[in-house]
Image (cartoon, rainbow, N blue to C red):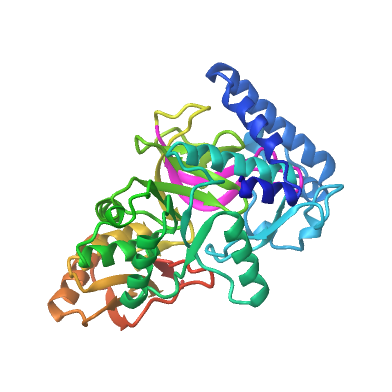
Amino acid sequence: MNLFDISLKLNGFPIEKAKAYFQTIKNENNADFVGHLETRKKAILSYHLKHNSFYRSFTKNIDINNWNDLPIMTKQDLQQPLQLRLSDGFTKKNVYVNKTSGSSGNPFIFAKDKFCHALTWAVFIDRYNWFNIDINRSKQARFYGIPLNMLGYYKERLKDFFSNRFRFSVFDLSDEQLDRNITKFKLTAFDYINGYTSSIVQVAKYLERKNLILKSLCPSLKGCIVTSEMLFDSDKKLLEHTLGVPIINEYGAAELGLIAFQDEQDNWIVNSEDLFVEILDDNNNPLPLGNNGRIVITSLYNKAHPFIRYDLGDIGTLSQKSTPQKPILKKLTGRTNDMVQLPSGKKAAGLTFYYVTKTVIEDSANVKEFIIEQLNLNTFKISYVSDDALSLEKSEEIKAAIINYLEPNLVVTFERKEKMERSNRGKLKQFRSYL
């Protein structure tokens, strides 16, 4: 029984229509796709200029005939009541409404029309099929957070039932709980794992300590999809070794859907079917392929709410092998608001800084997780979970690595914790700046 498709239909999302339309987009040849893309960009722009007063005011005194002159939309621009941003004919009762996670520090409520939301799921269904994962039938082991209020909790549990998934807690990653989790894998024919990178990495570290391979304990496993947090090369190797299945890197956003999905050749294929992705410099100019810049995205089918040249807050690079029909995300560097700023004026990507520290700190087998916080221009705090406190020698080695990578005269402090504080959704923010 296709429980997931049925649940979409019961909620008014035309999934069969969306699947059929999605297939027509996929069938476009590369030459025709360029024309198709330009048509869709003009169509969604024209629609919102005609039917959305918020977007009309947003583009006032702008040359709308030149795509590159269109204003960049930010999360701050959307932090106003939803009813002021909806297009004509749409209300909260006839759209899909959700809220962004707030991981950027700027959460807001957004809407999608029902066809657009169904099309989003058509994209996910297609990508999961690359790895013989059927959203309707494949059993999912889910490592996500869950609302703690009663209504939100039971709503998610009901969605889990219709989506054929079992949700593991990401708030308790103790060895005792992980032992119970592994027992559940032994007793359940899970097809795939899906969830936050940091939580699944903790499962992998537990398996490594116990000298276990999850695929041997749960032979039905086909793959592991990690999402919402950065996947570092060292963590991917650990996951591949301890889980014994392909590790699939997913990049998405609640307000947009799937942005990129790794294929069997480890290419991070950008979703060009219902999104248009640009890489821009600080002056909002498009960058050539291969250059690092701000990720700006247009939702080509969302008529209920405009996401036109929307700055997601992430930094990345498109591969030089990209084509309009098949863009390839070469690198995802991190968030624009996660930059390390230093007394000398130097800047560095926060997650790159985290990675440099990670290569040193994880040489110590006792360190399970850690985060870095920039308290002021020259002071950084490293909080970590470990059975034992870091030795003075290890602490000095970490400090030396940070100073070598950044600059001298920086202050680095350490705090050992019993467990990491995660967001109310269970995400772990590896680097945070308070500047």
Asked if one can make out residue 28 in the rendered structure from this viewpoint, the answer is yes
What's the magenta bit mostly, secondary-structure-wise? strand
Is residue 336 within the magenta segment?
no
Displayed quadrant of residue 407: bottom left
Residue nearest the observer in this picture, 331 or 271: 271
Left or right of 189 on screen, residue 146: right
Asked whether 412 or 148 is in front, the reply is 148
Give the left or right position of residue 48, taking residue 28 as reference. right
Magenta highlight on residue 300: yes
The residue shown at (21%, 67%) is 209
Q: Which residues are magenta?
A: 292-319
Residue 354, position as x, y percentages in the image: 32, 63
Residue 309 located left or right of residue 207: right
Question: What is the x, y in percent for residue 383?
Answer: 33, 77
For this orientation, the residue located farthest to the right is 89
Where 396 falls versus 215 (above or below)?
below
Q: Position of residue 122 (x, y in %)?
A: 60, 39
x and y percent of residue 94 in the render? 81, 52
Query: Dividing the picture into quarters, in which one does residue 378 lie?
Result: bottom left
Q: Is residue 158 above or below residue 314?
A: below
